[in-house]
Amino acid sequence: MTVTHAAVLTYVLRTKQKIFFCALPLQPHAETKEKQLNAWKSLILEYYRTTKQAVVDIREIDSSPLFNNTSINRKLPSEVVLIILEELYKSGNAIPLDKSKQRWLVYWHTLEEWGEIIYNWAQENGFAGSVCTLFELTQGENTTDQEFYGLDTDVLIRSLRTLEASKKAELIIFDDNQGVKFF
């Protein structure tokens, strides 16, 4: 995974926010709590965008630099992380991967937005009527300058399913072959 200097700098600047919020418990006052949750949602989405990660495992948050600030010996309780993830679910930016809600898929664009970003790229680059492998989309030399370059395969497939639902694409998945045909 290659992360640009600018992306790392953006994340480092935003972690100053994390220090503040790790130091405070989730506030009971509704307006303050909403501001805290919105700040955390933004921070989590920025972190996952910058690091090109997609999975949060509640059982492993103690080792995550996002939720555990060792410099001030504070960490966000797993109950609060779960509340934030549920808020991300409501906004279309996360989905639980298991019934116990211990593992979550997080995406900084909604699945529909990802689908449209990818579809627009395919249209602009002459891929209508063509088949692209999922590897070509997320790792190919034609997409290195695209936001979806390096995107998690599970997020990619789910976003392509939104295009399938609107008849803009067809997923082709069998055995070890994974591709998409754009219309």
Image (cartoon, rainbow, N blue to C red):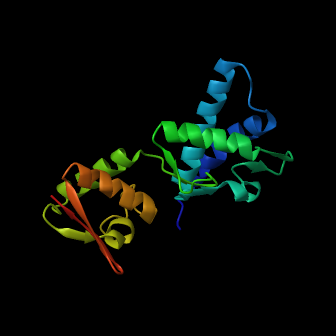
Question: Residue reaching furthest right?
Answer: 73
Q: Is residue 157 left or right of 15 when viewed as pictured?
A: left
Expressed as whole percent of the image width and height from the top left, the position of residue 153 reads 43, 65
Q: State the residue at coordinates (64%, 54%).
A: 102
Residue 146, by quadrant, is bottom left
Q: Please provide percent x and percent y for residue 136.
A: 32, 71
Q: Residue furthest bottom?
A: 175
Q: Nearer the viewer, residue 33 or 117?
A: 33
Asked if residue 177 lies left or right of residue 70, the reply is left
Q: Is residue 92 left or right of residue 160?
A: right
Which residue: 43% across, 58% down?
A: 155
Is there any visible trace of residue 43 in the rendered image?
Answer: no
Residue 11 lies, in percent from the top left, at: 61, 48
User: Is 35 above or below relative to 117?
Assistant: above
Residue 172, horizontal then vertical, whole percent: 26, 70
Please tell me whether residue 135 is drawn above or below residue 164 in the rendered image: below
